[in-house]
Amino acid sequence: MENYVENAVEQFRKLLNEQIAREKKMESEKKYTDYSKLEKIVIGICSGDGIGPIISAESQRLLEFLLKDEIKAGKVELRIIEGLTIENRIAKNKAIPDDVLAEIKACNVILKAPTTTLKGGTLESANVAMRRELDLYANVRPVAVKELGIDWTFFRENTEGEYVLGSHGVEIPDTLAFDFKVTTNEGTKRIARAAFEYARNNGKTNVAIVTKANIMKKTDGKFSEICHKVAEDYPEITAEDWYIDIMTANLVNENIRSKFEVFVLPNLYGDIITDEAAQIQGGVGTAGSANIGDEYAMFEPIHGTAPRLIEQGRGEYANPTSMFKATEMMLRHIGFTKKAEKLCKALVFCTEVDKKVVIDESDNSATCKEFSDYLMQQIEN
Ligand code: IPM
Ligand code: MG
């Protein structure tokens, strides 16, 4: 037992020093990409696992269609990045194999299909690794249901909290397990800044700071405190403290939910509550997710690889909507606002108005490809 304790203390010392260094680095090293100044924008496409390759092939087709002229003129390059598969990651025993990471970093922006995240073991999630390696600190997840008056934007902290040391916990066999949660000053400042800037630039007047600071006193306490400090620079915006438990109830409380606009929250709460929010919108298959950093950005669906659909041999019926929403967010981020608008309009028309080609669980469901053809026809019209 003594040995275990000594080893754990040693491990904790190392982790602490690494995390202090990470916070300092965040403060000092800032690299920005201005997409409007790039001669060529390189979009990397990672096709992932399970239904990933199916929905990502359709997104590639959609991008080739929407950016036809830009690709021809050499202003945009679509670069397919192989190797971010669970087989390759297990073989190399790396969340993102080195050569794959180098390819990803050579792009300006990434469109990523879902990748398998293993439960337990030590192989880290590819999402988490990519968010860390590219320093994608703001996970922005919009959810809107017009007829319910819902228009929410979640700013989930994306690089720390419960996730940053999720694969570095301590275990004393047959006795206990210990995980770590980390909240840094710089890490919190930048996500708070992103949320309040978004609110200001989009005419929003309410930002909910969602934590469990009554229990997680140090980490969430810091998160809330720093968010309030940042809020001082935005006097026109009301910053409200909420606890995550009651906020999950609020989202299904029809009497009050439409008053919420922008949410800023630590990593794990953001992960959980955005699935709930997406379900209110029609399911996780309908939601896109932007992972934004100062230098890079990565866009993905919020859902997983749908292994059950693959096991049933129904992969071709995968719904690409969330991947298309991610594509729309990416187009907006890199400056193709009009094309993003076009795509957004067509998506609304196809999924909420016309609904002639629908992917569902019935025997009459359209396939992923049929739905994509239908969508592209609407864009053309
Ligand atoms: C998400 C996912 C990921 C997360 C998983 C796949 C690691 O649930 O993007 O919300 O927990 O962040
Ligand atoms: Mg999630």
Image: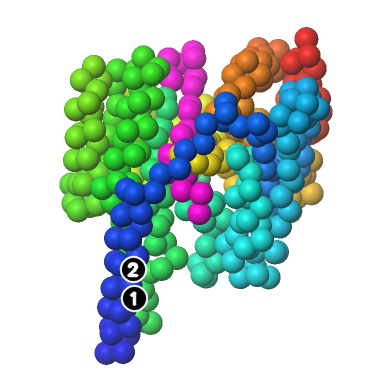
Question: For the point 50% across and 54% down, which residue is it?
Answer: 133
User: Could you say where residue 14 lies in the image, as x and y percent from the top left?
Assistant: 33, 72
Residue 11 is labelled as 1
- Determine contact: label 1, label 2, CB under 8 Å: yes
**Secondary structure under badge 2?**
helix
Q: Is residue 152 above or below residue 341?
A: below
Is 185 in the magenta? no
User: Could you say where residue 36 lies in the image, as x and y percent from the top left?
Assistant: 57, 26
Q: In this view, does 5 lie to the left or right of 341?
A: left
Residue 188 seen by the camera: yes
**Dot 1, how many residues are within 10 Å of its Cα: few (below 14), some (14-19), or many (20+)?**
some
Q: Quadrant of residue 343?
A: top right
User: Could you say where residue 199 lies in the image, as x and y percent from the top left?
Assistant: 35, 22
Kind of residue indicated by mark 2: Leu
Kind of residue indicated by mark 1: Gln
- Quadrant of the frame with the C terminus: top right
User: Could you say where residue 4 lies in the image, as x and y percent from the top left?
Assistant: 32, 85
Question: For the point 35% across and 26% down, which residue is it?
Answer: 197
Q: What stretch is highlighted in magenta?
A: 133-151
Closer to us: 226 or 108: 108
Question: For the point 66% across and 61% down, which residue is it?
Answer: 99
Question: To which residue does mark 2 refer?
Answer: 15
Question: For the point 31% across and 54% down, which residue is it?
Answer: 23
Residue 186 is labelled as none
Q: In this view, does 121 lie above or below 231?
A: below
